[in-house]
Amino acid sequence: MLDPDLLEQLRSLFQPLESRLTLVQSPSDHAQQEELREMLQGVASVSDKIEWVESGHASPVPRFSVSRDGSPTGIVFRAIPGGHEFTSFVLALLNSDGKGKLPDAGILARIKALRGPVRLRTFVSLECTNCPDVVQALNVMALVHDDFQHETWDGAMAEAEVERLKIQGVPAVFSGDTLLHVGKSDLAGLLDTLEEKLGRTESVDTAEGARHEFDLVVVGGGPAGAAAAIYSARKGLKVGLVAGRIGGQVKDTLGIENLISVPYTEGPKLASDLRAHMDAAGVTVLDNRTVEGVADDEATKTLHMKGGETATASQVIVATGAKWRELGVPGEKEHMGRGVAFCPHCDGPFYKGRRVAVIGGGNSGVEAAIDLAGICSEVTLLEFGDALRADAVLQRKLASLPNTTVVVSARTTEVVGDGQKVTAIRWEDRVSKEIKEKELDGVFVQIGLAPNSGAFKDLLETNRAGEIVVDDRGRTSRAGIYAAGDVTTSPFKQIVIGMGDGAKVALAAFDDRIRGK
């Protein structure tokens, strides 16, 4: 049964509904069928615009779909959407009625242009914090596209299917039996993947609103990008911000305790606050976009986005941040989602009672090893250096665990597997030069971040690590193009430093503008 306080919150949330929404539950003999019925009937009880019916073909697991005014929306759950997925369920209802934050015209045109029919299944864990972003993005696409169905499967209820498909990481998105995507993503990344895998029926190059003009454009929606956009807008400029998602890496951070004057916040909350501040400052936010390149004819910079949109301005600030660094060894890419993972919180449960390795001896690596030791039979941590780099308190905790082993001076050389699953890890002992191998079931990569500078590497000077080289004011090697935050050579990658860097660079760009530089 749903908590009375929660029901009251839902009553308020669904009060503005205008369409008739139907929760269509399939008949089933599953032991948890009644649990799903009680949840759906509870939700339906809070609004006269929502109804529950039981109809259709029998399902081996609890299943329901969402209809709007008698027509299927394309949204299906083969799950009891509790935990993190309850939000996905609530948003599916709001979005079905046109409520909530939906994509703008440019993104809607790209979704509608996907080559159909589109039939996707996403396997999730109800404990996964990354899964809802994928589920919610694909549900939105189902609402927009005329021939798109998306089913959310709870992996715990579909163990046979999980085993048949060799799923070892979530969220895992399938078209038929073909794996299209695994791991965290957002609407922008998923749309890029679907365009690549499924194709497009038409171009949106000439779609209304596909060409945007600004005084200054910021690329990147994390702390540095948001600060740069807000400071620039406060100077009276027409500012646009182009980003895959607002918050960037911050959105994946659960607890933040070092943002000065804010003793504690969480990544999603901070990302939401960044968006609200930009909206209040008058920044035009173009999210769910991927910048593919920049053309510079000195007076005008033109950003080319995937899907055909462009944004022009006389100044650009690059604040694209960083992403999880990959090992770059044989077998890694081939086994991503099939034994190679980056999120111990999301994918750790798939390795319960199994042997895993963690690559990386910094704070993130040692924390991952500690977490995994609670569910895995054995955890081996491999560190390239001759000692762990994590904080002493974490090292002491790791050393106290009986099922963990630390190997230092280890250069990972290969992820061994059969294409369906990981079977071992190989590394070189950097002292003896001996190649060693350990049989195991999974590898968690925790070796830090790599700068997201790829779209600019042919235009701007970068260092060996791929960071954009900047001076003390954030100027790059091209006049009129600036950079801030984790994507640059600025030291120390921290939220508060990124915010300060974004503000500094915005002020420098404005100073150059008024001085005619």
Image: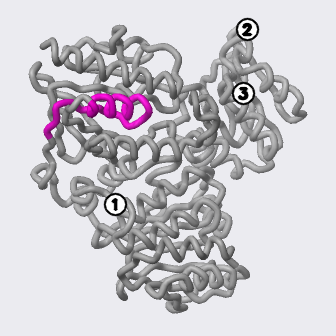
Asked whether disc 1 touches disc 3, contact meaning CB atoms under 8 Å apart, the reply is no
> What's the residue at 25%, 43% (across, down)?
284
Decide whether residue 215 is among the magenta residues: yes
Mark linked to residue 102: 1
Q: Quadrant of the N terminus?
A: bottom right
Secondary element at tag 2: loop
Mark 1 to mark 3 CA distance (whole Å): 49 Å
Mark 1 to mark 2 CA distance (whole Å): 57 Å
Up-down: is 458 above or below 227?
Answer: above
The quadrant where residue 8 appears:
bottom right
> Dot 3: few (<14), some (14–19), or many (≥20) neighbours within 10 Å?
some
In this rendering, position of residue 414 left or right of residue 32: left
Question: Which circle's residue, 1 or 2, is located before the other in the chain?
Answer: 1
Up-down: is 408 above or below 338?
Answer: above
Question: Which circle's residue, 1 or 3, is located before the other in the chain?
Answer: 1
Q: Give the range drawn in magenta.
A: 213-234
Decide whether residue 100 is among the magenta residues: no
- Rendered location of residue 155, percent (x, y): 63, 63
- Rendered location of residue 116, percent (x, y): 29, 67
- Rendered location of residue 172, percent (x, y): 53, 55
Mark linked to residue 437: 3
In this rendering, position of residue 284 left or right of residue 18: left
Secondary element at tag 1: loop
The kind of residue tagged 3 is Glu
The kind of residue tagged 2 is Ser
Say whether residue 435 is visible: no
Q: Quadrant of the C terminus?
A: top left
Say whether residue 420 is visible: yes
- Rendered location of residue 203, percent (x, y): 15, 54
